[in-house]
Amino acid sequence: MPRDVIELDLEEEADALGDRLDELAEAELDGELESSQARRLAGDVQQQMWALEEALEEHPDATWSIREFTPGEKAELTGLIRRTKEQAERTGQDDVESALDNYWAAAGLVDAPFLEDVDASDLHERIMAVRDKPNPYLVQWLADRVTEENTLGNGKRSSYAERLAAKQQDRSDEPSSAKPS
């Protein structure tokens, strides 16, 4: 059974990436991130933001949408990724991350301007369209968004990251010594 379709507003998504850049700048200034780490993370976010802006300029009225996978689609995608990694190992290729972004983005993509001439029900055709047509940073962003939509989280229980942050906050609130100041 197909999952719900999530319409993407690229303008809002680009703004969210801009907000992420602000967060990274704050984290660097506050010493939470080393400068080199912050700049590396910011570089990826910035490239994705610019790719979204480019897509908006090229296709201002386009519909962009993604969805969660069905169990069968996830199984098909997992098998395809496993075979790709095995083939890469046999041929001595050590970087398959870009190919994996193509697979992940294509699997979750429902509608985008570069899918107009593609049989959207055929995963391999979508992969070829994603591989050949859009900006690579747009593909990376799409893969990230598809990952978000396919990551479980119901908000009822805290994630590991939330629990870790809470523990760190608790420790920072504790007095540093038993002596009164």
Image: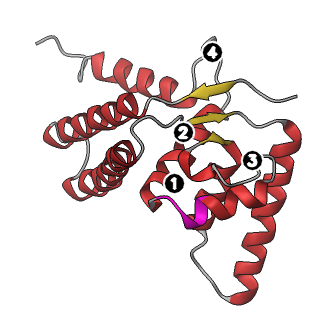
Which of label 3 and label 4 is nearer to you?
A: 3
Is 68 placed left or right of 180 in the picture? right
Where does label 3 land, which residue?
A: 120
Q: Position of residue 104 (x, y in %)?
A: 65, 51
Which of label 1 and label 3 is nearer to you?
A: 3
Where does label 4 land, which residue?
A: 157
User: What is the quadrant of residue 89 in the picture?
Assistant: bottom right
In magenta, the rendered stretch is: 130-134
> Along the polypeptide, which appears first: circle 2 or circle 3?
3
Distance of label 4 from label 1 (alpha carbons) = 31 Å
Say which residue appears at 51% left-offset and 30% top-offset: 8
What's the residue type where badge 4 is placed? Arg
Which sits in the foreground, 113 or 162? 113
Where does label 2 land, which residue?
A: 145
Looking at the rendered structure, the secondary structure element under dot 3 is loop
> Along the polypeptide, which appears first: circle 2 or circle 4?
2
Is 85 placed left or right of 57 in the picture? right
> Along the polypeptide, which appears first: circle 1 or circle 3?
3
> Along the polypeptide, which appears first: circle 3 or circle 4?
3
Mark 3: give few (<14), some (14-19) or many (20+) Cα within 10 Å.
some
Asked whether residue 132 is drawn in magenta, I would say yes
Distance of label 2 from label 3 (alpha carbons) = 19 Å
What's the residue type where badge 2 is placed? Arg
Q: Is residue 178 above or below residue 126?
A: above
Circles 2 and 4, Cβ within 8 Å, touching? The answer is no
Is 83 placed left or right of 24 in the picture? right
What's the residue type where badge 3 is placed? Ala
